[in-house]
Image (spheres, rainbow, N blue to C red):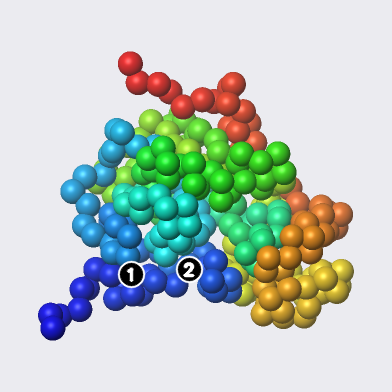
Amino acid sequence: MGDPDPRTLDALGLAEAPRDHPLTYPGAWPGESGLLDGDRLLPLTRRVYEDRVPVVAVGSNACPAQLRHKMAEYEVSGTIPMVKARVTGIGIGVSAHVSLLGYVSASPFHAPGAVGELFLTWLDAAQLAVVDASEGVPAATGAYDRAWLPSSDIRIELDSGELLPGAYLYVNRRGVLHDGSGTPRAHPGERPLLASLLSGSPRLRRLFGDTPEEFCARARFDRALCERGTRLFAEERMTTASGLERYAQPERYARPRRT
């Protein structure tokens, strides 16, 4: 028997998906760029893929195990280049909706001057359709729109030093949660987020219980309860605009076509 493969997600500590363990959201991200190939993360030979679509991930779409599950569910190829990128102009906030998977997900907001390390996924057409579906893009009542962010407004520098002319990003249709002053609150990780939300809202505790564990257990796959929680965010005036809504208008910001 040979030595264990050091490039498997399990060996790299990347095998656990938030869809199965909601309190781990957004899940483990890789330490460096790599090629997700099913259950393995392999070295990349390049950073730009002209035949694929660039999508910035701010939450669990940067978790290899989550991506693997999404592709396997639709029997779509799980080979996805994941490139570490330095992104200027985006903050990672809290989605103004409760996910059917039992967590409150991350959602981007406009943050001029803010710099963060995120992952850029390069998706083919079938993979893009899967991720779109998982974010609710095709559904009238879905949570997210996919928006093109041009480099004139958002700077995306790959770990190779290459700059992109823009990329897609999923923007929440209901906005993001704010910190009490109207400023979008940062997503601190699922457990501290849920603990804070529950401690600040008696109505939320009546719906989802007193602890993050109870919240996840009650919300998971209960569509009616998730919808009630989402409405409660709005009713208690916990939401604000992300500042990215204008990019979700395809007639104004469509992805440039190469000639």
Q: Is residue 159 visible?
A: yes
Whether tag 2 and tag 1 are in contact, CB under 8 A, the answer is no
| Residue 2 horizontal/vertical position (percent) | 12, 80
State the quadrant of the C terminus.
top left
Residue at the limit of the structure toward the left, as seen here: 2
Residue 19 in which image quadrant: bottom right
Residue type (three-letter) at the residue carrying disc 1: Leu
- Are there few (<14), some (14-19), or many (20+) residues within 10 Å of tag 2? many
Total labels drawn = 2
The residue to which callout 1 is attached is 9
- Amino acid type indicated by mark 2: Ala
Residue under the point 28% across and 39% down:
48
The residue lying at 73 percent from left, 65 percent from top is: 222
Is 190 situated above or below 151? below
In this rendering, position of residue 201 left or right of residue 23: right
Q: Is residue 142 positioned above or below 208 on the image?
A: above
Compared to 54, does 35 lie above or below?
below
SS type, badge 1: loop
Q: Quadrant of residue 11?
A: bottom left
Labels 2 and 1: the sequence-earlier one: 1
Q: Residue furthest bottom?
A: 1
Q: Which residue is mark 2?
A: 17
In this view of the protein, which residue sits in the foreground, 78 or 36? Answer: 78
Q: Secondary structure at mark 2?
A: loop
Q: Nearer the viewer, residue 16 or 252?
A: 16
In the rendered image, residue 119, in percent from the top left (x then y), is placed at 40, 52
Can see residue 63?
Answer: no
